[in-house]
Image (tube, grey):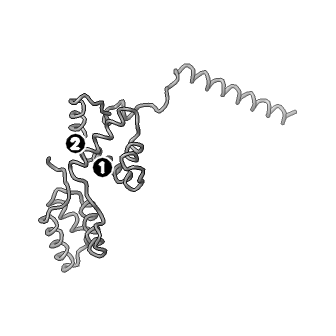
Amino acid sequence: MKGFHVGWTQTESQLLEEAVVIARAQRLPLRTVFESVAGQTGRQPNSVRNYYYTQIKQSRSGVPAFVPFSEEESLGLVRAILHAQAKGESVRSCTLSLAGGDTKKMLRYQNKYRALLKNKPDVIARVRAELFGSGTPAHAPFSRAASKAPKQQQRPLETTIQELVSALYDSLLALAKRNSERAG
């Protein structure tokens, strides 16, 4: 799948390491390295930066600081969330359930899903089509109805206007009464 990055290849890691060495020798800011490597790898500069600092942290502690999602994990996450949302469940509730109550994992899942929504709408559409093809209901996160759905049932405009006029009338009466008491 084009543009769907899963982990870093050895070549990409070496490219980053070499670019950092050259930048340090030339006393250039690391930001320029992140932007350059991003352009060469098709990644976002912030992703390159995060990977770089994760590698530094890992080399100091010996413990992996970040475990990237595999493509299958990402697709499974999207499947689960779209199906749960079709049943009326929120993303937060679904990811908390998937994480077995672990809030740190829940945030990781939620952030991954939101990143895929923003950056990989084609992945979301593909998974949604796959779910429909198998007869499984799936939420439509990009539909106008989904983004503009009211949180509560709207009342008729006529009722709302009548309530506003009534409230305005009551306010004017109270104000008139106060003014007459002051004058009297």
Q: Is residue 57 above or below residue 177?
A: below
Which residue is the extreme one toward the front? 100
Q: Please name the residue shown 14% across and 69% down the image.
A: 14
Q: Is residue 140 above or below residue 26?
A: above
Q: Which mark is residue 55?
A: none
Q: Position of residue 168 (x, y in %)?
A: 66, 28
Q: What amino acid is labelled 2 in the image?
A: Val
Q: Please name the residue shown 42% across and 43% down the image.
A: 93
The Cα–Cα distance between marks 1 and 2, rounded to whole angstroms, is: 11 Å
Give the structural element (helix, strand or loop) at label 2: helix
Find disc 1 in the rendering and name its residue: 115
Q: Is residue 71 above or below residue 40?
A: above
Q: Position of residue 97 (x, y in %)?
A: 39, 45
Callout 1: few (<14), some (14-19), or many (20+) C-alpha neighbours within 10 Å? few
Res 36 quadrant in image: bottom left
Q: Please name the residue shown 37% across and 32% down the image.
A: 87
Please state if 116 lies on the left or on the right of 104 as rendered: left
Picture quarter with the C terminus = top right
Find disc 2 in the rendering and name its residue: 123
Res 76 quadrant in image: top left
Q: What amino acid is labelled 1 in the image?
A: Ala
Please state if 163 lies on the left or on the right of 61 as rendered: right
Which residue is the extreme one toward the top? 158
First reached walking from the N terminus: tag 1 or tag 2: 1
Q: Nearer the viewer, residue 57 or 153?
A: 57
Which residue is the extreme one toward the bottom? 25
